[in-house]
Image (cartoon, grey):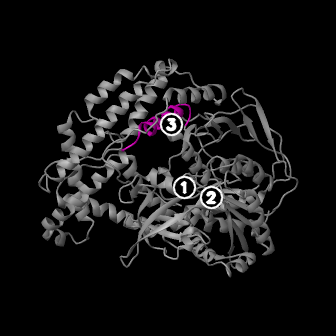
Amino acid sequence: MINKTLISLLLLPLLALSQKEKNPCETLASINALIQENHYRPKPIDDSLSVYVFKTFLSRLDEENRLFIAPEINELKKHEYQIDDYINGHDCSFLHDFYAAYSKSITRYAAIIASLKNEDFPLSSDEKVIFSRKAFPYATDETELKHLYKKRILFNVLREVAELSTNKDSLVANFDSLGTSNKPKVIDKYECKTESYQMSEDEFNAIFYSVFCSYFDPHTEYFSENDKSEFFSTVSSDNLTFGLYVSLSEKDELTVDDIIPGSSAYFSDKINVGDQLLKIKYKNEEYEIACASMKKIDEIITSKEYKTAIFTFRKKSGEIYNVRLVKKILKDYQNNVFSFKLKTDKSTFGYIKIPSFYSTFENGKSSITHDVVKEIYKLGEDQIDGLIIDVENNGGGSMEEAVRLSGLFINDGPLAIMNNNKNNKEVIPDDILGTIYNGPMVIMINGFSASASEFFTNAMQDYNRAIVIGNKSLGKATMQRIFPLNANNDEFLKLTLEKFYRLTGKSNQYNGITPDVEIPLLFDKQMPRENSYDTALKNDEIRGVLKYNYIENVIYADAIAASKKRVTENTDAIEIEDLNTKINPLYDADLPPVVLQFSSIFDNVNQINSLWKEIKKETEKVYPITVELNAADIKIQKKDDFMKTNTTERIKNIRQNFHILEATNILYDVNNLKP
C-alpha cells in the first residue's frame, strides 16, 4: 500500500502496441450515451468540447511543453475544431495522428538525452533559467529543444552539488570534481523518464477518454478495470494487499513503513521496516523503483489484477534480497476509523478519526458508520465530556454512509436535498431513530475534506449540532455512480448524477464549507479546491427552505467567539500565517530568473532550503495534548504488536496537529461557559 507520493521511473526504449487494440469510437460512443442521458448537466458535443479536449489532451501528454515542438503542434491543430465532428461521425482515426506525434516525441527525447550524455559541455553558463507557473512556448525545432534540455541538466547538476553542503567555500573548492561526478547521475535520471513516458495505444486512448469526461465536470471519469479496483481500494476497510505500507524517505527512496500481521510480507520473515524497495517483477516484466512510473507501481500494489509479484529490497546493511509476495484480503489499517482519549486537567474528550467514508465495496467487510458506533461505545465507557470528529483529508466515499453517520447525531428530520438532471428534488431523511451521542461536538475539516465529508459536516452545521473548525472544504457537492461500458466489464464510467443542497437551499458546491472557526494551516491556499477546475459545476441555490429542528445553543456561540479570539492571538497560529506569506509566492508568482552559475544556484537553493527548514520545524512542533487509548483498546493492544506501532504513530500525529489542540480548548469552553 502506498501512503505518500511516489517517484517517476524507466522501462523499455520503444513504444509497443498492445496485441489487440480496441476501437476507441466504441468506447467514446458508450461514454457519451451515458453522459447525455444521465449526467447532472450534460453538454452538447460541439466546437467548445473540441477546443477544450484539444488543449487539455496535449497538456496531459506534455505538461511542460517540453516533448513536442511547434511544427508538430501546428500540424495537429487541423483537428482543434473537428474533434466533435469526428466523435459524432464515429471516426476516431484522428487519435492515430496524436499517438504518432507523441511516439515521435518520445523517440526524440531519448535520442537527445543519449547525445547529451556523451557530449562534453561546461558546467557554467551566462544564460538564465526561468521559472514560470505557466507552460513555456513549444520549442521551434529540435536544436532549440536540445538546448533547453542542456540548460535543464546543467541547472540540476548545479543544484545537486549545492544540496551536498551548506559550506559554500568547500563546495566551490571541489566543484570541478563534484560537478563532473554528478553530471552522469543527473542524466541517468533523465534517461529513466523515457520509460515512464512509454504507453500502448490503448493506454494513450484511455487518457483521451479521461480528458473527454473531464469536459463535463472534474469527477466524471473513465476507469479501466484496474482504475476501478484502485478507486475502491481507497474507500474500503479491507483490501487485497501484499502486506506492505511504503513511503518516500527524505532521500527519495521507497522504504517500508509497516508490515501487516498475517500478510505475505509478514510471513516472509525477511522484510523489515526501513528496508528499501528497489524493484518489482511481475511475470516477465521488471519495474525498477528508481525509474518506473508512479501509476504503474501504484497499480501493481493496489490493483486486484496483480496478485503475485517478486520484490527486491535492500537492507540498511547493504544486503539485497528477493521475496515472492502474494496478495490477501486484509484489514486496511490506514483507512479504518480509530479513536483516542484526549485529557486535560479536568476533562476527557473523545477523538475519532475518519480517514474515508468506506463501505462494503468489493473487498470491504465493514462500514464507517458501524465502526464509528463501536468507537463511540468504547469512548462512552470512559465517560467522555465531548467528542471531536476529524474528517481532515477525507476525500469522501459512500454517500449512503454519510447519510447513516449524520443520522447518528440528530433525533429526527431531513438531512439534505438531492437534485438530478430532471430537476427532481428528493429530501434525504434521517432513517435512524434516536441518537448515539448527545454531548458537545467539534468537527475538523480542511481543503481535502470533500463530498461525503462535506455532506456530514453540512448536516451537523445546519442543525448546530457541532462546531466546525479548520479550513474551507474542497467544495464538491455532487454524487457519482460507476457504470459498466460494455458486457466484458473491463471499462467503466464514474458519472456525476446528482447534486446535494443544504437544508437552507444553499450548496457548498464550488465554494466549499466555511468553518465556524477558521484556523491557519500550512499550504492551505495551495490545496486544489473545486473552484480551481475549469469545468467544475458552479454554485447555486434552490428555493424552499426545509423545516427542521435547529438546535439553539448559546454556549456554542460563546465558545466560537472565544475560539476566534484565542486563535487570533495565538503565537503558533501567527507563526503559521507568517510562514504562509513566505510559501504562497513560491506557488502564486513567477520566481526571479537564476544565472546558470554555481554561486547563484547555491544561493537560490539555500534560500529555499532555509524556508523548508522553517516549515519542517513548524510541522514537527509538539503541542500540549495528552493522548491515551480507551480502556477497550488497551486490552487489545497487549496482544497486538502491530497496533502498538500504529498507536505510537497516531499519537505523534495528534500531538503535532494544532487544530486538535484548539478543538480541545473549544470543548473545554463548552463545558465551562455559562449560558
Q: Is residue 65 left or right of residue 638?
A: left
Residue 208 part of the magenta-drawn span: yes
Sequence-wise first label, 2 or 1: 2
Depth check: 345 or 452 in front? 452
Residue position marked by numbered label 1 in the rendering? 302
Depth check: 496 or 607 in front? 496
Residue 154 part of the magenta-drawn span: no
Q: Please state which amino acid type lies under the numbered disc 3.
A: Ser
Q: Is residue 292 left or right of residue 216?
A: left
Report the Cα–Cα distance between label 3 and label 2. Answer: 25 Å
Placement of the N terminus among the 4 image quadrants: bottom right
Q: Residues within 10 Å of mark 2 (few under 14, many from 20)?
A: many
Which residue is at a point 68% across and 51% down the rendered structure image? 361
Q: Please state which amino acid type lies under the numbered disc 2.
A: Asn
Residue position marked by numbered label 3 in the rendering? 210
Q: Please state which amino acid type lies under the numbered disc 1.
A: Thr
Residues at marks 2 and 1 touching, judged by CB atoms closer than 8 Å: yes
Residue position marked by numbered label 2 in the rendering? 239
Which residue is at a point 36% across and 59% down the rendered structure image? 290
Q: Nearer the viewer, mark 3 or mark 1?
A: 1
Q: Is residue 640 above or below residue 497?
A: below
Q: Secondary structure at mark 1?
A: helix
Position in image of residue 103 (x %, y %): 32, 37
Sequence-wise first label, 3 or 1: 3
Report the Cα–Cα distance between label 3 and label 1. Answer: 20 Å
